[in-house]
Image (cartoon, coloured by chain):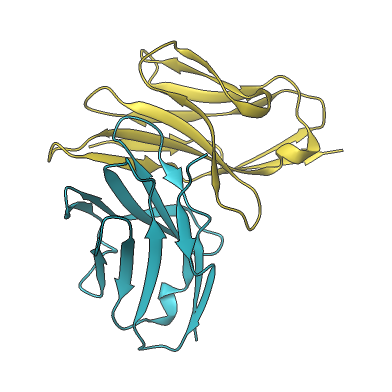
Chain colours: A cyan, B yellow
Amino acid sequence: EPEVTQTPSHQVTQMGQEVILRCVPISNHLYFYWYRQILGQKVEFLVSFYNNEISEKSEIFDDQFSVERPDGSNFTLKIRSTKLEDSAMYFCASNTGEDEAFFGQGTRLTVV
Amino acid sequence: AQSVTQLDSHVSVSEGTPVLLRCNYSSSYSPSLFWYVQHPNKGLQLLLKYTSAATLVKGINGFEAEFKKSETSFHLTKPSAHMSDAAEYFCVVSDFMDTGRRALTFGSGTRLQVQP
């Protein structure tokens, strides 16, 4: 069964460093998403991506964040200069639009 | 704009008793609605979905939900709770935003506890 894969599963980084979280969405999907979940809090929308551009983004998704689809398979989230409050579980998801989103297992980012 | 309200942040039931997790939504268009479950330290797993077909939707592990447009609700139910059902449950709406693009909006989640 097709699935969304995320790498790495855990990432520890020092404050101020850049991190790139990687995702491989399901191959025939058109919409890609990043969500985050700070420990003990709700799942928050960061950004959606369609047709090689950002279609929606939340207030959280400031200039420190960027997304890219560098080739036909990967979808990446970059945080330019990490802050302690960026520590969270980051989920990637994809879908064709109307149907359910398929989520990856998440990347746990810890900023120290 | 779309929004999702999960009316209970915590629900506690006894094993073998019914489960009801409530969800109300607002949407300007015709939404698709989903319930996802998240077990501790795990990812998000789809339980069931409504995408404009039958209003009573059956999902995995004995869960079902009924889409009621007049009440703008999509409550999740299960006749008999099992210990393994203890998890966080998220109601999610997928709809067109004002930009004409689709987006997913999560409810704040309901933590289900199952007592032996």
Is residue A46 or residue B6 the one in the foreground? Answer: A46
Query: Is residue B49 toward the left or the right of residue A57 in the image?
Result: right
Residue at point 65%, 48% (across, down): B39
Residue farthest toward the right in the current orientation of the protein: B116
Q: Is residue B35 above or below residue A7?
A: above
Q: Name the spot of residue A95 as percent of width and height, x first.
A: 35, 40
Residue at point 42%, 75% (across, down): A85
Q: Is residue A102 above or below residue B27?
A: below
Q: Name the spot of residue B45 as percent of width and height, x first.
A: 55, 42
Residue farthest toward the left in the current orientation of the protein: B99
Based on the displayed image, in which of its 4 quarters is residue B71 positioned?
top left
Is residue A67 or residue A15 the one in the foreground? Answer: A67
Count of numbered tags: 0
Query: Is residue A94 toward the left or the right of residue B108 in the image?
Result: left
Q: Name the spot of residue A10 as percent of width and height, x first.
A: 54, 72
Q: Name the spot of residue B73 as percent of width and height, x first.
A: 43, 22
Residue at point 76%, 23% (across, down): B80
Q: Is residue B72 above or below residue B37?
A: above
